[in-house]
Image (tube, grey):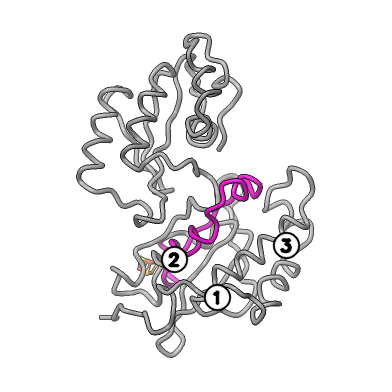
Amino acid sequence: MTSGSTLDAPADDPLHLQRLGRDPAFAAWVRRNVRPHRRPGYAIVTLSTKHQDQAPGDLSAARMQAIARWADDYSFGEVRVTQRQNPVLAQVRRTDLHALWCQAAAAGLATPNVGLLTDIVACPGGDYCSLANARSIPLTHAIQARFADQDLLERLGDLVVNCSGCMNGCAHHQLADIGIRGIDKQGAEYYQFGLGGSHGEETRFGIVIGPAVPAAEVPAALERLLSAYLAQRRVGEPFAATLQRIGSQPFATAAYGARERDPRPAPESLLPNKKQFSRK
Ligand code: SF4
């Protein structure tokens, strides 16, 4: 979901190129969170709710009021809420992009990760849902922390990762490049990986690649799986295309093959004795 070249040199805003060159954070946001509008002089802005400090899709009252103000000031009073758990201001003048970015960044809604791995869709999971087998939000935060390196995220490129707390699949884990589904094994939280799901013109369910792993092992297993992708992909090849070309076995081998050798400690929030929710 990167912006097109029309945003790189808007003829109606001579300051835009200067700002892009002067401010790398603004440039990263424009590259990731802003898309061209079919009407010249306008752009589509996605406000990211995906950050380690908040549950995906959660918005406080203050943030919602801020978004309502920005909609009035910059987008003809309109804001759209998307399945990807990010609000969208669909018609922003390109001349207003920098002013909007300044305010969105101050409000914590300008993480430049739209379409990247950390833009995870997660259901409420065991923290809030009485049907859950496992929590989704702490796992999402642990993955976001593990993949905090923006350069690595950009190398991985567009990637759909969805995490559901049970088989009901409210986060549409079955339709993601990488779907993660919570499972209860004798009271402990485990998670399955499914690969190759897609929605849109080529809708298909992902295929589960192996046994569920304990919560604490998921971020490391995901990292190994994605290292296999980086090692195997051709130049510019999206994850789904690599998966179709080589099949799921290399990813499964990577994800499960080196579990005992991972040197980094598991996030405390995912340790088995931290399971706090109770099923009703
Ligand atoms: S996927 Fe399961 S745990 Fe998540 S919100 Fe839906 S029913 Fe609840």
Do residues under tags 3 and 1 come within 8 Å of each other at their CB atoms?
A: no
Specify whether residue 147 is painted magenta: yes
Residue of label 1: 217
Q: Residue at the spot x=35%, y=43% of the render?
A: 108
What's the CA distance linking mark 2 and mark 3? 24 Å
Do residues under tags 1 and 2 come within 8 Å of each other at their CB atoms?
A: no
The x and y percentages for residue 142 are 47, 65
| Residue 219 located left or right of residue 225 | left
Amino acid, disc 2: Ser
> Looking at the image, is mark 1 or mark 2 earlier in the sequence?
2
Q: Quadrant of residue 236?
A: top right
| Residue 183 located left or right of residue 242 | left
User: Which disc number belongs to residue 233?
Assistant: none
Q: In which quarter of the image is the C terminus?
A: bottom left
User: Which disc number belongs to residue 164?
Assistant: 2
Q: Is mark 2 within 8 Å of ligand 1?
A: yes
Specify whether residue 12 is painted magenta: no
The answer to whether 87 is drawn above or below residue 228 in the figure is above
Q: Ligand 1 is found in which quarter of the picture?
A: bottom left
Amino acid, disc 1: Glu
| Residue 257 located left or right of residue 110 | right
Q: How crowded is mark 3: few (under 14 residues within 10 Å), some or many (20 or more)?
A: some
> Looking at the image, is mark 2 or mark 3 earlier in the sequence?
2
The x and y percentages for residue 76 are 29, 22
> Looking at the image, is mark 3 or mark 1 earlier in the sequence?
1
The answer to whether 8 is drawn above or below residue 2 in the figure is above
Front residue of this view, candidates 99 and 263:
263
Q: Residue at the spot x=43%, y=85% of the render?
A: 188
Q: In which quarter of the image is the N terminus?
A: top right
Residue of label 3: 228
